Amino acid sequence: MIRFIQLAFLSLVMVLVSAGCTDFVEPNQLAFVIGTGIDSAGEDMLEISHQIAVPSQLSGTSKGGSGDSDSFIIISAKGKSVFEANEKVQRKLSRKLMTSHRTLIAISQDFIEKNNTQRLFDKLNRDPANNQRDNIVLIKGSAKEFMKIRHPLEQLSSIAANKELRINGMNKYSIRQFIIELTEKGTRILIPLLQSDKHDEMGKDKARLVQFAGYAVLDKDLKIKGILNEHEGTRAIWMLGKGSFLGITIPWKDGNGTVSFRLTHLERHIHSVDRHDPKQILLTVKAQAYLLDNTTPLDMSEVDNMIVLKRYLDEKIQEDFQATLNKVQQWGPDIFGIGEYLHRQHPYWWKAQKNDWDENFKNIRVSVKANIQLRSTGTSAGQLEQ
């Protein structure tokens, strides 16, 4: 009986000890990283700049989204790897770095051009502390300076840039998606390029907006082969299957007004023109169109005009999209995933092509076809007359 009581007491002690959280960290002992900037710092060196939120300043409702400079701090350090630079940042802080709430990783254009960018993603992919949901963008200029920007609407520039991506329908630029595309042999990467707009300084403290500066086309070594402007980039996003909605304005025939549409349910499909010939590809883009602005003389209550408008919209989209695709194809990187399609449809042919796909892609004949459904012409017929 005594032995049973001793064993029961010992078991109770072991349960109580094992239930304790010896490595638990309280929230007030954490430094929440919201954004990270990566810059080149010389040969084989990089600089990490963490944008760290100051919770006591973020919680106040009186300041709203004023972007007060006290709502975040920027801590930077240099190293030969992301891990080494992070360790140096950690030594400067009284709290433990917490990156699982990060929303944005900003890499400077200069870093991409001067460094082996593939090495950068090893820690981001290997370390379980990274959630891989944070978006990744390129920065025109210094990523560190980008992290310092005070935004007039949001309290942190990282949150502002992340919201700008999402509200413009660009939801598929996470670290996870980036790494998936990086491992594919038949797909190259298109990544948004951002910059601060110095012409839109707000208030006496010079808060700035963040704007798109284009889209960078990367080759298999993650080097920039070319920059698409905003219009070309939105077309490319649709053609590579990442678009969700789009606003478009096109001039009418002979410059007689314009028509503006909101396009939803964006789709793209890749097919072989001849199943025995992998070098002829048809890329079809589909969408549902809603006419929101009409400055042409067309009366949209007439069915014939609706048919003419639908055909003209298809023709213009095909023309513009074909020009954008040809431009990217001249550079070489296959951002559209046509190589992945050919990998599945023509596996034996693909084996001889995959190692030099950036060059071989230039010899593939890709035609663009548009099929837009005109869902609505609005609540009025022609233009309002006085």
Image (cartoon, rainbow, N blue to C red):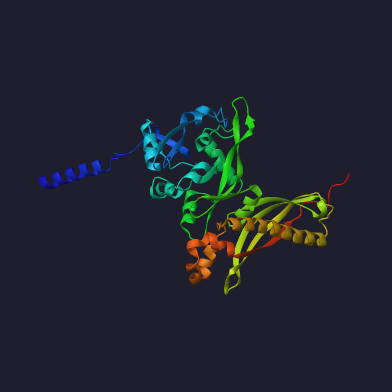
> Exactly how many numbered labels are in the figure?
0
**Residue sitting at x 44%, y 36%:** 32
What x and y, as percent, mark residue 345?
53, 70
x, y (%) of residue 24? 33, 38
Quarter of the figure with residue 272 = bottom right
The residue closer to the viewer here, 155 or 225, is 225
Q: Residue at x 47, y 29 (%)?
A: 56
Relative to 370, 378 lies left or right: right
For residue 48, say whether it is visible: yes
Which residue appears farthest toward the top when viewing the image?
A: 204
Quarter of the view holding residue 266: bottom right
Closest to the observer, 137 or 352: 352
Q: Residue at x 38, y 42 (%)?
A: 83
Most foreground residue, 233 or 33? 233
Q: Residue furthest left?
A: 2
Can you say whether 227 is above or below 144 in the image? Answer: below
- Where is residue 351? Give x, y as percent: 47, 68
Residue 59 showing in the rendered view? no
Q: The C terminus is located in which quarter?
A: top right
- Where 241 falls versus 215 (above or below)? below
Outermost right residue: 386
